[in-house]
Image (tube, rainbow, N blue to C red):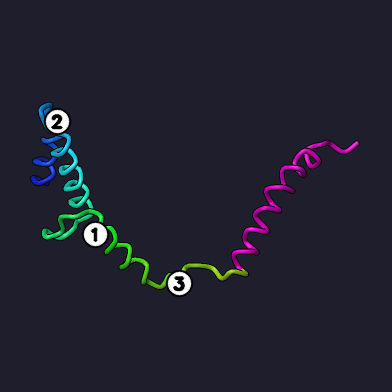
């Protein structure tokens, strides 16, 4: 938290240079992402995080057929249900 306060002070300093603000912004994001202390480059850290997350097997993804069925029923419900509501609300004669 102390490190973030030091970094934030650069943003509030009216005499900060654009380069100092840019470096402080990168350090702030590295701190938020909890990058290791030796990680000084945001692009490298984000790429490493992407590689780590892309190799995980996502078991919660539905099968292609399941996804098609889900979207089909969702679309039918969104198209048909609103059309049926006025017909259901008309009192019988």
Give residue 86's mark.
Answer: none
Most common SS among magenta residues: helix
Please name whichever residue, 9 or 14, is drawn nearer the observer in this view of the structure: 14
Q: Which residue is mark 3?
A: 59
Tell whether 37 sits left or right of 58.
left
Q: Which residue is mark 1?
A: 44
> Residue 39 at x, y = what percent?
15, 58
Please name whichever residue, 7 or 16, is drawn nearer the observer in this view of the structure: 16
> Residue 49 at x, y = what percent?
28, 62
Please name whichever residue, 90 or 64, is drawn nearer the observer in this view of the structure: 64
Residue 89 in the image: above or below residue 15: below
Q: Earlier in the sequence, mark 2 or mark 1?
A: 2
> Residue 77 at x, y = what percent?
69, 51
Q: Earlier in the sequence, mark 1 or mark 3?
A: 1
Q: How far apart are the alpha carbons under marks 1 and 3?
A: 28 Å
Quadrant in the rendering for residue 8: top left
Q: Secondary structure at mark 2?
A: helix
**Figure quadrant of the C terminus:** top right
Q: Nearer the viewer, mark 2 or mark 1?
A: 1
- Sort mark 3 into few (<14), some (14-19) or many (20+) by Cα contacts within 10 Å: few
Q: Nearer the viewer, mark 1 or mark 3?
A: 1
Q: Which residue is pictured at 16% across the width and 48% down the height?
A: 27
Q: Which residue is mark 2?
A: 12
Q: Which residue is pictured at 45% across the width and 72% down the height?
A: 59
> Residue 15 at x, y = what percent?
10, 28
Q: Which residue is pictured at 18% across the width and 58% down the height?
A: 35
């Amino acid at each position: 938290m102390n490190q973030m306060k030091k970094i934030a002070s650069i943003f509030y300093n009216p005499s900060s240079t654009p380069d100092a603000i840019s470096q402080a912004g990168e350090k702030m994001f590295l701190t938020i992402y909890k990058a290791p202390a030796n990680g000084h480059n945001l692009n490298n850290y984000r790429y490493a995080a992407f590689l780590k997350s892309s190799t995980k097997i996502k078991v919660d993804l539905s099968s292609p057929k399941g996804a098609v069925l889900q979207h089909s029923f969702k679309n039918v419900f969104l198209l048909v249900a609103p059309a049926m509501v006025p017909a259901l609300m008309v009192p019988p004669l």
